Image (cartoon, rainbow, N blue to C red):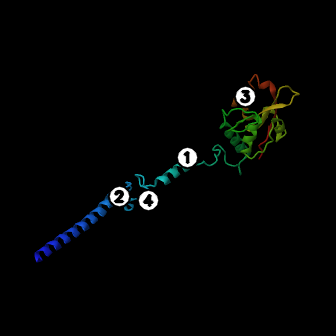
């Protein structure tokens, strides 16, 4: 009888151990496999977005690229602008004016144009250049003929303005800036239908007969 009781007790204890073992194995394997919908266990889910290979956050990198693409540069400055003539002599200012004007050789012609970006007409060019040496001119060639002091055509100097008429009694239609006045003639820089160019107006069959007057606008 005692042996039968021991046998039954042994069977009972063995069966209980098997239940605990299966319960533990089931829970443990569930953690490894995840839930039935194949989603990873919460402990395996990352708490942050993965980084790029270089260690930078992908969202931040994208934002920086977009900012770089949409970055607007500062407004362009005129690199050819000469220094302001504070205590320079008249001759120095004349040289400044013609040196500055030469920087725009080849700039296209545009009726009513006032800047290198849009192009120049004749008086827009002279006004733009003279403004850089602190000489303020009116806008049109006709009104610029009233600026400064009148000089004889044979006595013009670099930086003076020369005006043109189609006939002696017609109105001024063109203005240019003197670059040099030698025995070879008067050389000017001006904005024409060819753009900003240099011409010897004394030897030009087109410009020579239209020479009208000259003004000195750069004073001490």
Q: Which class describes the residues within 10 Å of circle 3: few (<14), some (14-19), or many (20+)?
A: some
Per the model, the C-alpha gap separating discs 2 and 1 is 44 Å
Residue under numbered circle 4:
48
Q: Residues within 10 Å of mark 4 (few under 14, many from 20)?
A: few
Q: Residues within 10 Å of mark 1 (few under 14, many from 20)?
A: few
Residue contact at pointers 1 and 4, CB within 8 angstroms: no
In this view, the mark in front (2 or 1): 2
> Residue at point 43% right, 61% down?
47
The x and y percentages for residue 54 are 41, 53
Task: Report the residue that reaches farthest toward the top.
Answer: 205
Q: For numbered disc 4, what is the local secondary structure?
A: loop
The mark that comes first in sequence, 4 or 3, is 4
Q: Is residue 105 left or right of residue 173?
A: left
Residue 29 appears in the rendering: yes
- Residue farthest along the front direction in this orientation: 1
User: Of circles 4 and 3, which is in front?
Assistant: 4
**The label number, if any, that marks residue 193 in the structure image:** 3
Camera-side residue of 17 and 86: 17
The answer to the question of whether label 4 and label 2 lie on touching residues, with beta carbons closer than 8 A, is no
Looking at the rendered structure, which numbered label has been put on residue 7?
Answer: none
Instruction: Give the spatial CA distance, label 1 vs label 4.
Output: 28 Å
Q: Badge 2 is on which residue?
A: 34
Q: Position of residue 63 (x, y in %)?
A: 52, 52
The residue that label 1 is drawn on is 69
User: For the N terminus, which image quadrant?
Assistant: bottom left
How far apart are labels 2 and 3 at the CA level? 82 Å
Helix, strand or loop for disc 2: loop
């Amino acid at each position: 009888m005692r042996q039968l009781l021991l046998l039954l007790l042994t069977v009972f204890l063995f069966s209980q151990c098997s239940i605990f073992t299966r319960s533990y194995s089931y829970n443990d394997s569930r953690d490894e496999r995840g839930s039935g919908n194949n989603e990873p266990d919460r402990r395996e889910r990352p708490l942050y977005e993965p980084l790029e290979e270089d260690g930078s956050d992908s969202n931040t990198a994208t934002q920086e690229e977009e900012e770089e693409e949409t970055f607007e540069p500062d407004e362009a400055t005129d690199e050819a602008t000469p220094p302001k003539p504070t205590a320079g002599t008249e001759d120095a200012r004349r040289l400044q004016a013609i040196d500055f004007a030469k920087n725009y050789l080849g700039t296209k012609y545009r009726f009513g144009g006032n800047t290198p970006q849009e192009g120049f007409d004749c008086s827009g060019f002279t006004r733009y250049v003279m403004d850089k040496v602190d000489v303020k001119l009116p806008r049109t060639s006709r009104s610029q003929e009233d600026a400064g002091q009148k000089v004889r055509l044979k006595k013009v100097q670099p930086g003076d303005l020369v005006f043109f008429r189609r006939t002696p009694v017609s109105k001024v239609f063109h203005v240019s800036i003197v670059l040099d006045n030698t025995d070879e003639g008067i050389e000017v820089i001006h904005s024409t239908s060819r753009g900003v160019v240099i011409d010897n107006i004394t030897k030009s069959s087109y410009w020579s007969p239209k020479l009208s007057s000259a003004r000195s606008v750069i004073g001490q």
